[in-house]
Structures are given as C-alpha cells and as structure tokens.
Image (cartoon, rainbow, N blue to C red):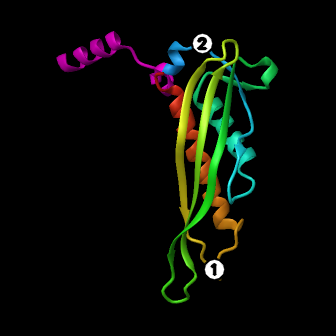
Amino acid sequence: MMFWVRLLLCLAAIGCASDSRSGLTFLDEDAPRRVAIEPFSGGGNIEGLALPLRESIASELLRRTNHTVTDRPTADTLLRGTIRSASRRLLGRSTDSGLPSALRLEMILDVEWIDLSSGTVLKSLRNVRIAADYAPGGAGVTPGGERETVARQQLFRRTARTVVDALQSDW
C-alpha cells in the first residue's frame, strides 16, 4: 500500500502529459510559426520528386509541430531545398535470369530554414542522404511501376521525418 502512495505522490510531483507529443521541447518552448515551403529545386535522374517531397514535408510539419504551413506573403519563415542528386542504383541481380533483384532509390539534398524578417538561417542541412530499397520482381524493372511507387513513398516519408527532426533539434 505504501508503495502505491509513494508512486502517486511521485507522479503528481513530476506531472503527467495528456498529449504524447508534449515531450518535445520544440512544441512547448517555441511560439508557432507560419512556414512557407518552396518547391524543391534541382533534381537528378528521377523525375517528379519535387512536389511530392514538398507535400510530405508539409504534412509531417503539420502533424508533429505547432507550426502552420502557408504561402510566402503571410509566412514568418521559409523552408527551401535543393535536390542535389536523385538516382536508382542496382543492388543485386537474379542469378537465374540476370534481371535486377534489388534496387535503391537515393536522394541527396540540402535544406535551409530561414527567418523572413531578419534573413537569418535558422537551420541548414547539407548533403542529407536518404534512400529506400525495393525489389522490382516480375519480368524486369519498369521505372515508375508499383514497387517503385512504394519505394518513392518511403523516400518521401523518410525525408520528411529527417527534415522535421532537424528543425526540432537545438540550433
């Protein structure tokens, strides 16, 4: 009985969070900001990455922070990025057919988060490498096929998490 009383007193003294996200100091200490996200520039050997990448980062930012995503004229800060390279890389071939058995989508990017009122760079990420592997299967590799689409979605989610994690870290 005494154990439970001590436990309750300890919990009362520490406090309990009703929101699982409140453990992130970023959400508690910083005032909400309005963030404009520019479409990523640059590219590589893979077409169509810029817009879905922007949308994934915006969704992750809204989901995990107290910031809002808006257009540039009403924004406090600007998030912009450059896709330095994007490529498909062969990881393995089938010993029976010689066809690709494993591929990797890989992207290297730079990202800056800028305070629009002062022009100060709040956070800068350089040469961030994100990859997603997949097995093409079937009768060969068809870029843009269903399995590559799944790998692209993984690539976008991983990139969005990496960027938002970096924005949440101390600078």
Numbered circles on residues, count: 2
Q: Amino acid at mark 2?
A: Ala
Q: Position of residue 104 (x, y in %)?
A: 55, 63
For residue 55, what is the image quadrant?
top right
**Residue at the image position 60 percent from the left and 76 percent from the top:** 137
- Among the two numbered marks 1 and 2 on one chain, the one whose residue lies closer to the N terminus: 2
The residue lying toward the viewer, choosing from 8 and 73, is: 73
- Which element is circle 1 on? loop
Taking the view exactly as shown, the residue that stands out farthest to the left is 2
Q: Residue 105: x, y in percent?
A: 59, 59
> Mark 1 Cα within 10 Å, few/some/many (few <14, many 20+)?
few
Mark 1 touches mark 2? (CB < 8 Å): no
Q: Nearer the viewer, residue 63 or 37?
A: 37
Which residue is labeled 2 in the image?
A: 31
Position of 109 relative to 48 (above/below): above
How crowded pointer 2 is (Cα within 10 Å; few <14, some 14-19, many 20+) is rated as: few
The span shown in magenta is: 1-25
Q: Position of residue 162 (x, y in %)?
A: 53, 39
Q: Is residue 66 left or right of residue 102?
A: right
Give the farthest residue toward the bottom: 96
In which image quadrant can residue 146 be found?
bottom right
Q: Position of residue 77 (x, y in %)?
A: 68, 21
**In percent of the image, x 69 and y 51: which residue is there?**
43
Please name the predominant secondary structure of the magenta segment in the image.
helix
Q: Amino acid under label 1?
A: Gly
As drawn, the label of residue 120 is none
For mark 1, what is the residue? 138
Q: Residue at x 68, y 55 (%)?
A: 44
Inspect this view and state whether residue 31 appears: yes
Up-down: is 48 above or below 17?
A: below
Q: Quadrant of the N terminus?
A: top left
Mark 1–mark 2 distance (CA, rounded to whole Å): 51 Å
